Image (tube, grey):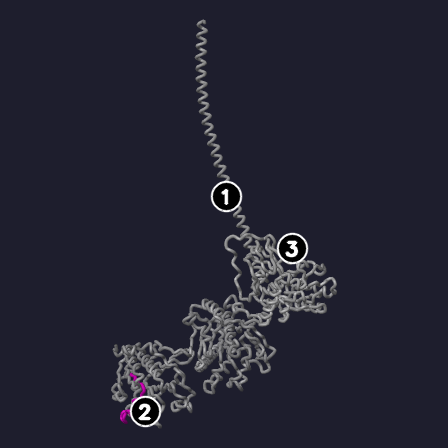
Amino acid sequence: MSSWRRRLVAAMGDELGRARGEARLLAERTAERAESERGRAEQVIGDASRKQTQLRRIHDKMTATLEARKAAAVDAGHRAALAAAALAAPAAAGALWSEWKTESGLGRGPAPLLRVGRIADSSAPLRGPSLPPTPPTTSTAMPETASTGRAPVESGDDLAAAGGITPGAATASAGSSIVAGGYDNPGPSVTETSLPALIPLLDRSHLRIDTDAAHALPGLLLRAVGSVPAGLVRLHMYDPERLGGSLSAFAALGKAGLLSFVGPSGLRDELDALVETVRRVNADVLAGEHESLAALAAATGRRPEPWRVLVLLNADLAAWPAHDQAQLARLRRTGVAAGVHLVIVGDDDAGPADLPRLTATGATALPGATVELDPPPPSTAVTKAAKLIAEKHRAGREPARLVDLLPQRLWNASSATGLQAPIGETAAGDVARIALGDNPPHALVGGPSGSGKTNLLYAWIAGLASNYSPDELALYLLDFKEGVSFARFASGRRDPTWLPHVRLVGVNINDDREFGLALLRHLKDELRRRAEAAKAHEATKLEELRDADPDGHWPRIVAVVDEFQVLLEARDAVTDEAVQLLEDLARRGRSQGIHLVLASQDIAGIEALWGRPSLVAQFTLRIALPKARRVLAESNHAADTVARFHAVVNDESGHTGANRVVAVPNAGHADAWEPLQQRLWEARASDNEPPALFDGDHVPDLTTAVPEPETALLGQTIDVASRGAALALHRAPGRNLAVLGTRTVEAADILAAAALTAARGASERGQRIGVDICCLEPDAAASALALAAALETEGADVDWHDDLDAACKDWESRCDGMLRLNLFHAVDAGSARLDAAGSARLRAMLIDGPERHLHTLGWWRSVPRLREDLGGFSARFDAVDAWLALDVQGPELAPLSPASGGPAWYPRTRRGLYFDRARHRVPQVVIPYRTTALLPNPSAVLDLP
């Protein structure tokens, strides 16, 4: 081979080797790159797969969330619908028959809708806690039927068949529930959460019921009469074919006047009567102020007229005479506003064609909804409910609650021209108001025990106090019977509030007639003050005085005296003065805004009023409770027949033509009164003071007040101001005190009160006082020792004498010009042991001591013993200016009394008759202070172990 060939082969071999090497290298690099790309692709695919999984999870979660929200929204809407249905058809208007009872759900709002069944396919599973039950009200439950825990849809075919009403679907089902005889058999049920089918009737519309839905009529009517207060729905049945047999289970309502069955011959009269009712309601009740009874009830909270439902069964309206058809048309147009409603049952196309309709599967009031009607209630349930409603109606309508009669805004009225206050409701449901002013000026209230007299006074006071502020009205309240009826108006330990209008409260004063007299005296003083102000301003009555003196304080005054006959029951000076004051206040009080309200169980027995027609004639407002005597005119016997919790109100002196029968609310119960008083108390002005309280059973403690100079206080006077009974201890003949009687504790309290208050007065003024104590009664020794220690604490110079002779000896030497007191316990026990000289010293000290500022405050246990110590039968009593008698009869006090024969006084526990000839015209009754709290323990005084 030539060389060039060899060189060419070698070169080609080299090139081929290099090519193969490069090819192998390229293949390796390509494989590496492919492997890398494959790994990268796998990573991308893995990432995509993970993202896809994550997106699927997010999608599923969002889908689940949306589904949950949708379910929650549906559930909430379902719950809201159920709650709205419970509000629209409360209590008996919407309850299932298994839970049904006569229970009024009527409030201030519209009349309830009435359940007729349930809306088909409206169930929804409830999530979470169930809806709260409707709050229970007082009612009498119908007998309950058995249940498996699911709300049943009861059968009422027995009633439908017996009554002649076409049953339609004799057995209604809910879901796959099987119903027989009013009881559920086991099986799934959705009735519990299905929406009720509610239709309007009362206050809203009329209704036409097709024949295939006629079995819903008994339930509709039962729910109507049972869901409002007894008597507020009255049924009028026209059933020419069965003459009322269709609804015979309601017959018990007829005995109470709540149901009437109308036959063919009575149809015209019934239509005419209902049309006349519509006219009367429009003219007299609505009177142009309200568009309908529903509007009136919403505005005032009361229902003055019942609903009247005319039910026409198989009426064949096409055959009616023209007159009857015209009357029916009038009722269709105007009846609803006046509470007259038509329910026409049957397929007759004649008559009103535009009435809302109820069929077996639907109702005009529920457009687009399929309705499954409830079956009628069991006939026994209807009968029992009808009897119960009839009994409640015959027992009388329940009076309005006190809170419903009172104004929503307090103290919005002026008393310038008079007082107006609600006291109850009339038979028509109107608020009954009574007036006090120029006419009538005063009131008599009468009623035997248990007739509600005190409750009526509570209601009256509540009405006055709610309408008029304390600047417009002042109340004085006295109760002579044993009890504390008026104590709630004053501040107490249990309830610190008080009625801001009340100035004075007197309770348990049956033995303290003087307090009633004190009130009349106080009112006469106020009458005199007002008369003088009116004269100065040239005014003739309170209204003019208030205009002339706008800056003055001239509220109207109402004085309420319960059981006032106690004040006038005795033939004595208290009765004589009380009658005179009553006559003056009754005659002149009207023009000055002072009004009297006198209440009694039996006015006929008050002898003090006999022969005083002018006094009784001033009380033109008469209020008679059941069985009250002589409150109204002689020929007016309305109180003999008025029902309990009612009263006859008459503002024409009791003449028959002015009678108004009023149902009085329960105003005395704590639940009614205490919230009102709390509200009034919180609204009071900051300077409003609690009323003065006089409790005849309360013994006052010795006051810490400082008396006038050289004055001692013996007890509390029985008057409006509760002042202390003062004894002046100035230099003058006769300024001594004799405490008369055998009641040791009270006598010791009187002497202790006198000495302590006199010592306190001297100490406060930096003056000295000396006290000589002689106790001759062992039972009073402990009190006298404690008194001695208490007087030393007050800064008095105290000297103790063991016998009366020592106390009288050298009395002149003790007279050094400062005030000095002799406190002698049981003087007569020591005077009997005195010799002639000692008796002379005692008399000389009594006669001459006061002029030298030595005053004897002594306790004698009888009047004859006092007279003996003063010199015997012919002795004069001018050495003792003041006396305070305890258990001493009035005639025994004749020698000491300015009245011949002695004062009209009979002893009473913890009461004394006090007379100071230098200050008093007649004796006054006082209550000795209790001094125990201010005296130390006697054992501590003697340092006993």
Q: CA distance from mark 3 to mark 1?
A: 41 Å
Judging depth in this view, the residue of 375 and 608 nearest the camera is 375
Q: Is residue 853 visible?
A: no
Q: Residue at x 44, y 78 (%)?
A: 508
Vertical placement of 16 versus 724: above or below? above
Q: Tag 2 or tag 3, which sits nearer the N-term?
A: 3
Find disc 3 in the rendering and name its residue.
Answer: 361
**Residue 712 coordinates in the image, percent (x, y):** 34, 81
In the image, is 708 to the left or to the right of 370?
Answer: left
Of the two numbered discs 3 and 2 in the rendering, the one whose residue sits closer to the viewer: 3
**Residue 923 coordinates in the image, percent (x, y):** 40, 85
Q: Amino acid at mark 3?
A: Thr
- Local packing at callout 1 (Cα closer than 10 Å; few below 14, some 14-19, many 20+) is few
Q: Which numbered tag is attached to residue 61?
A: 1
Find disc 2 in the rendering and name its residue.
Answer: 869
Q: Tag 1 or tag 3, which sits nearer the N-term?
A: 1
Q: Residue at x 46, y 25 (%)?
A: 34
Q: Which residues are magenta?
A: 820-839
Q: Is residue 575 magenta?
A: no
**Residue 481 coordinates in the image, percent (x, y):** 47, 79
Pointer 3 with pointer 1, Cβ within 8 A: no
SS category of the residue bearing label 1: helix
In the image, is 511 to the left or to the right of 854?
Answer: right
